[in-house]
Amino acid sequence: MKIKYTYIALLGSLMAFSACVDDEGSYEYRDINEVTVEGIQDSNNPYSVMASTGLLEIRPTITGTILGEDDSQYEYTWYACQSEVGTDNHTHTVLGHEKDLVTTVELAPGTYDLYLLINDNSTGQEWIISDMELSVTTPMATGFYVFGDNPDGTVGMDFLSMPSNGGGDTAIVKNIFINSQQIRGAENLYYRGYTTRPGAIIDLWAVTESGSYKIECSIQEQSTFDIDTSYEEDLMFFSTMMEHPVKVLDAFPHQISNGSAWYNPNYRGYVTEDAIVGGGFVSGAEAYQNPVNRYSATSTEFFTPYKNIFYPAEGNSIGGYLTYDMDNDRFVTLNGNYMFLTTSYCRQLTDGPSDAFPWNQSGRTLVYGTNSGYYSYAIMKDTDNDTNFHLYEMYVNSYYSPTKVNAYSFTTAEAPEFDMASHYAITYSPGDYTIILYAVGNELHQLNYATGQHTLVRTFDGEITFLEYNWKLPGTEAYPNSRFLICTYNEAAEPEERGTIYEYTMDQTLQLTPVMSGPELNIPFEYHTSLKVAKLEYRNSSL
């Protein structure tokens, strides 16, 4: 693009000149050096750059009517502005002082007016090159929060940015969590997804050894985040029957694979250390009533709930929730469709003689429970024998009649060191992949729980700190196989590379291979962080 500008900074002098046009005195006139600027984009073709990671590159050609291509007398200042120049809330940020602007833009996401100020030191003339626009996008719209511990034990957070739904360049954005309260001991992080419903809270909760904390997550406003201390104005736990301060362990339902939250507040709930509460709207805020983890509407006796709720996580509607009573070792469901009522409670389920597995356990207890896109899974252990395990598959399609799909049993003879496992991942498609991956120290094991076949998949350089089946990532139609996320931590590595994030895919022969990333899908999915990662949590939202 070619634009011609004459100097406009001396506007006041030009106005004074207009008051003297009738003066017939003798004057000496000099030619004014005018500049022509080429190689820039106007506001009809804005510049776009990713905040903190993307490179803004503008290389204009500047020619003067007197100085020609000699730019030795020019000084340059590039700057970006928000809101109207001259107003009280106007802000501007200097981006550089060279003719060629090549810089990583450290600006909050948003739209900016872009200016180039040229000063001719030989004449004192100035030109302001305007009509340029800069769009700063966030690298944190799509990807994974990387949540874990810094070397000093304080909680930290990075973001694994995966623009264009996994098809663009993937990169780690470092240190996005300020942690002004110096919370310690990362345990879990969950993001319930975006919602446009007025009054509904967009949840990002961090669970640590000391408590749970709601984290700021409005990426349109900022690029670093802290603990959100204002949420209590919009999120209320009314009941005195639960412990306060509340330690939230989970929010449900979770986001679905497109990143959105479940919209209906009557189905939104929280699991705390001692309660399950459901919500509704009161005066535009989310309000949570009496705990439902009890067996009558008048009872003040509450059972200890398992930290996760069982339900079909990828459905367009929710037919029911199932929870687990850790005190009495039984799966239970609600007495009705809603948990936000003050009179809601749980009810026991009845077992049949030919059922695949029992809802009410006798000599078994829950070790681990999770949801995939459709089925829910529970790993059970015999209470009198630490070597005997069971896997339950279930479909929670109704509050009144959740379905028992199948059950499998195996021992540590078939699954070595399963009793010592720290993390588990269970595949989504039982008909195709009856697989559990489990981690013991730095070893990744694979068990086909239908056949009893075991494989030691890989021994890593560091301890496995996170393992999860990755069914949420959009674009999985390009990867029709099962995908798994794995994080390790190696104390002996360089500080910035102690934590490593891997992704693997499993084909129909049940072989695990690294997922390939990068623009040409030719780089193994392997990214480094200084954190000891406790959780990768997916996000797909520009809100």
Image (spheres, grey):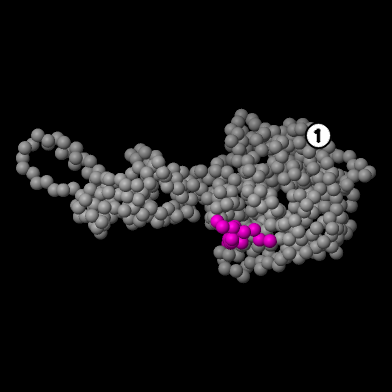
The secondary structure type at the circle numbered 1 is loop
| Left or right position of 215 against 341 | left
The type of residue carrying mark 1 is Asn
Q: Quadrant of residue 451?
A: bottom right
Is residue 525 placed above or below 294 in the rendered structure? below
Give the residue displayed 42% in from the left and 47% down from the top. Answer: 47
**Circle 1: is it few (<14), some (14-19), or many (20+) Cα within 10 Å?**
some
User: Residue 248: percent from the left, percent from the top?
Assistant: 68, 45
Q: Residue at x 35, y 50 (%)?
A: 39
Number of dots carrying numbers: 1
**Outermost residue, top side:** 283
- Is residue 517 highlighted in magenta? yes
Where's residue 386, x and y in %?
85, 60
Rendered location of residue 16, percent (x, y)? 17, 38
Q: Which residues are magenta?
A: 513-531
93 on left or right of 500: left
**Residue at the spot x=38%, y=49% of the render?**
93
Reading the image, the residue beneath label 1 is 335
Q: Residue at x 33, y 55 (%)?
A: 99
- For residue 426, side relative to residue 223 (left or right): right
- Residue 219 on the magenta segment: no
Look at the image and tell me in which quarter the C terminus lies. Answer: top right
Location of residue 148 in the rendering, given as x and y in whole percent from the top left corner:
62, 57
- Looking at the image, can residue 481 be seen? yes
| Front residue (pair 183, 65) | 65
354 vs 291, nearest the viewer:
354
Residue located farthest toward the left when viewing the structure as drawn:
25
Residue extending furthest toward the bottom: 492
